[in-house]
Amino acid sequence: MKKRFAVKCLSVAIASLAISSMSFAQDWKPNRPITVIVPWAAGGSTDQVTRVTAAEIEKSLGQKVVIVNQPGASGSIGTKSALDAPKDGYTWTAGAAQDLGAYETLGMLKTRISDWHLFLNVANVQLLGVNPSTPYKNAKELLDAMKAKPGQVTVATAGVTSSGHNAMDLIAKVSGVKYRHVTYDGGNPAVVATVAGETEVTTQLAVEQADMIRGKRIRPLATVSDKALDLEGFGVIEPLSKTLPGFKAPANYFGIFIPKGVPDEVVKTVEKIWIDNISKSEALKKYATSRGALFAPYYGAESVTAAMPAVQANAWLLFETGKGKVSPDTVGVPKP
């Protein structure tokens, strides 16, 4: 009887310890501000949504979340800073998940998507937008001009790993056109360059072009997708698949990324924030609706599953167009 009682007491003690450990793991209380390195210029898609998300995280943590813009080398400089920082949970980064699968393929940075905990917030779509002074009234007219003047039509993007560059390269691959690539340190500078007439075209994200479209300073020709976009305050933007039958592009997921190796309680706490706060955030829902994005608060295995189609498509497109130095399947990105 005593033995049975002792075993029972031990079982209760172990269970209590497990519950206590679980509670501790989910209740990380940072004692100083958290830094989120945005590896792109201020005002772009990553900067916009990260600031909205950071404000929501602050409510749950009771601690300041500081955004630091560190653009350069297509996002790899800021991403490396987060990767090299002490693994204490106080330094994160943000951006498009597809970039994490491109850096090693490009020979820019030795990191893979498996090196990170993904906490996604929105899925974005790229737009084919032009300066209103250009003669292009629809996607067909623009593509015809690119065919008639190979390599002469200028396209602004945020660099070789950016969503805009990925979109334009995919268009070029499918349609056979050639263009002149002009790069900037972020999506917002690329859009502003097109508005200013430095370039004729941009293929950056809808969230970066939305205000300029509503202000009639950019003319949207098509979504770089097989789905139309109903942009608040403007109307419906038809898909590129209407001009290029069969054209498809995977959803481009954005979020906050925490390097693996940080304490478990950091990850568990952020997961709990995603469940309790981010997934219900009216601020993020409003941002997505007003900017032409899809609200997508994924974390854990679900986030990787959601992001992988774009990760694969981007990495292999870079490799097959000669920009990648390393075959993606050797760095953890199988062919789609």
Image (cartoon, helix red, strand yellow):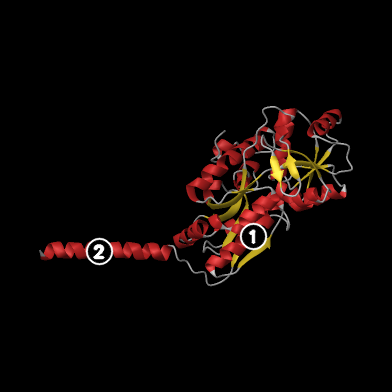
Of all residues shown, which one is farthest toward the bottom? 31
- Regarding mark 1 in the picture, which secondary structure is present there? helix
Location of residue 147 with respect to 41 vertically, above or below: above
Question: In front of the other: label 1 or label 2?
Answer: 1
Q: In the rendering, at what x and y percent does residue 79 appear?
A: 63, 54
For residue 132, which numbered disc appears in the image?
none
Mark drawn on residue 52? 1
Q: Residue at x 53, y 66 (%)?
A: 60
The residue that appears at 50% across and 59% down in the rendered structure is 276
Residue 246 location, x and y as percent? 67, 28
Q: Name the residue rendered at 21%, 65% in the picture.
A: 9
Which residue type does callout 2 highlight?
Answer: Val
Q: Is residue 147 left or right of residue 269?
A: right
Specify which label sits upstream in the sequence, 1 or 2: 2
Give residue 317's quadrant in the image: top right
Determine which residue is flagged by label 2: 12
Image quarter of the N terminus: bottom left
